[in-house]
Image: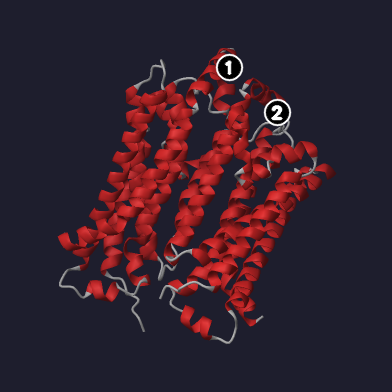
């Protein structure tokens, strides 16, 4: 418990910075939306663009003159930021002990290793949940002035749930990387590299019919804003894959950390 | 400039350069492999597009990026490469001197009979050489992948060269900004969040304006200064912005020398 609170305290600054950044992003974007709203002829051109391009930019199926459509386009940025924040939080929590040479101190405390990992991951999870809640709150506050309909809030709820699930996947991925890696300094870069790679794969998956199978590889495609916008729910395969990857990564993380040789 | 430091730094970066160049190559090859099937669809849509007034096309950045042409498609892919280049350069700049303090090797290095500017210069030149090697590999792969997948499409070599040039300026901007930031903060434990914030922040700012038209704030982002679409359609850089960027690089590096000379070095205690 004490470790959990210590980790929480250590992560507060980072959480604040991420929240400020996403707040700026949302405010900036909603301001842009004001220019778009009620200008339907600017959308006529979207119908002429090839579906691949729209799909690649995840702009298909969205009507940009409505707030729903607008937040649909924004989703990929939420997802990316959530993924990065989650992966960095979980990997940092574990790798920083070795980087700052405090790992010997922490591990000689009369606490099993897996309990330490649990405390750290719970703190990171709390951060993730708070991050989603803040994003939600800021979105709701910024759209207040536009007198939105109820359907927008339903869609937002779905979007935030998807963001949280993506965070879970990358939280466990970051944990696994930090637990398994022999070079703590590299862990952050590795996580970011993987996230970028997966993001690019999700772009490829949308670009060509022959490549749609790629969507099973990346969480950014599992939760495709245009899909759950039109259907109002997540694909079952996405939920199954999320559960499987999270359990698998976490299991591997605990397993490797319990028997690894530490970098001192 | 000290040869021993230079060589050591280069050796330290070998594998990192390899990984970056490798992933850039993979990304490009994947993208370019899609070009043949993509260009066929695009030609038809360009005919439709020609009927629209230019203002409409400008709003979506489509007047500048013609995806049916090879350079247009390459420009579309190039944005993602720019992002990778920016992260790499920011990483190198941020860790250039901060890594010594974090590894507690700074006091060892700084007690060598060398002045701090000499040490900084050697490290700087080494990092810039690794960035240059990345660039050269990147150019080679780009040209190879263009040659492989272009089919019978014609393209403007000058446009591609201009894009390559913008990559170099990108490296310099993010490298020098990273270096400056690392010297402005007291202690940098982890480089990744900083480099991410720098590179991704700039990317997102400019990506937004690409989708949704014009707001002046976007001129903060180097991605906007070297928008591939604009470079390809105008066949030149925006001179004012290039001068501003060059000034930025020079000031950041000069300020870094000044700050490093006066820096209070964290040592093991």
Chain of the residue on which disc 2 is drawn: A
Residue B231 showing in the rendered view? yes
Task: State the separation of the CA atoms marked 1 and 2.
Answer: 23 Å
Considering the numbered disc 1 on the image, is that residue within a helix, a strand or a loop? Answer: helix
Q: Nearer the viewer, residue A130 or B249?
A: A130
**In contact (CB < 8 Å): disc 1 and disc 2:** no
User: Which residue is at the front of the view, B144 or A126?
Assistant: B144
The residue pinned by badge 1 equals B45
Q: Residue at x 44, y 75 (%)?
A: A100
- Tell me where residue B16 appears, x and y as whole percent: 35, 53
User: Closer to the camera: disc 1 or disc 2?
Assistant: 1
What x and y, as percent, mark residue A36? Answer: 67, 33
Kind of element beneath mark 2: loop
Note whether B101 is above or below B233 in the view shown: below
Instruction: Tell me if residue B197 can be seen.
Output: no
Q: Chain of mark 1?
A: B
Image check: B30 left or right of A83? left
Q: Are marks 1 and 2 on the same chain?
A: no
């Amino acid at each position: 418990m004490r470790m959990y609170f210590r980790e929480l305290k250590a992560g507060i600054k980072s959480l604040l910075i991420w929240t400020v950044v996403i707040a700026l992003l949302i405010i900036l974007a909603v301001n842009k939306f004001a220019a778009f709203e009620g200008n339907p002829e600017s959308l006529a051109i979207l119908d002429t663009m090839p579906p691949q391009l729209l799909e690649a930019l995840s702009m298909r199926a969205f009507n940009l003159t409505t707030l729903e459509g607008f937040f649909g386009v924004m989703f990929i940025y939420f997802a990316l930021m959530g993924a990065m924040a989650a992966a960095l939080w979980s990997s940092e929590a574990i790798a920083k002990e070795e980087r700052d040479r405090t790992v010997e101190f922490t591990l000689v405390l009369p606490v099993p290793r897996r309990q330490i990992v649990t405390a750290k991951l719970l703190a990171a999870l709390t951060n993730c949940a708070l991050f989603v809640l803040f994003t939600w709150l800021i979105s709701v506050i910024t759209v207040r002035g536009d007198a939105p309909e109820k359907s927008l809030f339903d869609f937002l709820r779905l979007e935030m749930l998807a963001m949280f699930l993506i965070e879970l996947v990358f939280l466990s991925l970051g944990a696994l990387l930090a637990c398994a890696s022999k070079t703590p300094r590299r862990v952050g870069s590795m996580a970011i590299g993987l996230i970028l790679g997966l993001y690019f794969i999700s772009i490829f998956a949308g670009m060509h019919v022959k490549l749609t199978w790629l969507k099973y590889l990346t969480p950014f495609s599992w939760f495709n804003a245009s899909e759950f916008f039109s259907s109002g729910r997540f694909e079952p395969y996405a939920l199954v894959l999320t559960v499987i990857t999270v359990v698998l990564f976490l299991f591997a993380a605990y397993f490797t950390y319990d028997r690894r040789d530490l970098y001192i | 400039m000290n040869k021993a430091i230079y060589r050591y730094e280069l050796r330290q970066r070998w594998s990192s350069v390899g990984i970056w160049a490798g992933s850039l190559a993979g990304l490009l090859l994947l993208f370019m492999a899609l070009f043949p099937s993509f260009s066929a669809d695009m030609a038809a849509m360009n005919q439709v597009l020609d009927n629209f007034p230019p203002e409409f096309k400008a709003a979506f950045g489509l007047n500048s990026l013609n995806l049916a042409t090879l350079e247009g498609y390459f420009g579309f892919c190039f944005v993602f490469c720019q992002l990778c280049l920016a992260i790499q350069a920011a990483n190198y700049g941020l860790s250039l001197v901060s890594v010594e303090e974090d590894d507690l090797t700074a006091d060892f290095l700084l007690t060598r009979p060398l002045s701090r500017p000499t040490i900084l210069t050697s490290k700087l030149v080494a990092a810039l050489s690794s960035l240059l090697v990345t660039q050269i590999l990147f150019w080679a792969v780009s040209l190879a992948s263009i040659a492989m997948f272009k089919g019978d499409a014609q393209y403007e070599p000058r446009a591609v060269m201009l894009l390559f040039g913008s990559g170099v300026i990108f490296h310099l901007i993010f490298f020098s900004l990273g270096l400056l930031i690392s010297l402005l903060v007291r202690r940098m434990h982890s480089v990744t969040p900083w480099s991410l914030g720098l590179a991704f922040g700039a990317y997102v700012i400019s990506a937004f304006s690409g989708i949704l038209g014009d707001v002046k704030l976007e001129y903060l982002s180097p991605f906007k200064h070297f928008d591939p679409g604009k470079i390809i359609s105008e066949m030149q850089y925006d001179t004012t912005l290039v001068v501003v960027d060059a000034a930025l690089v020079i000031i950041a590096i000069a300020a870094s020398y000044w700050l490093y000379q006066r820096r209070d070095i964290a040592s093991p205690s």
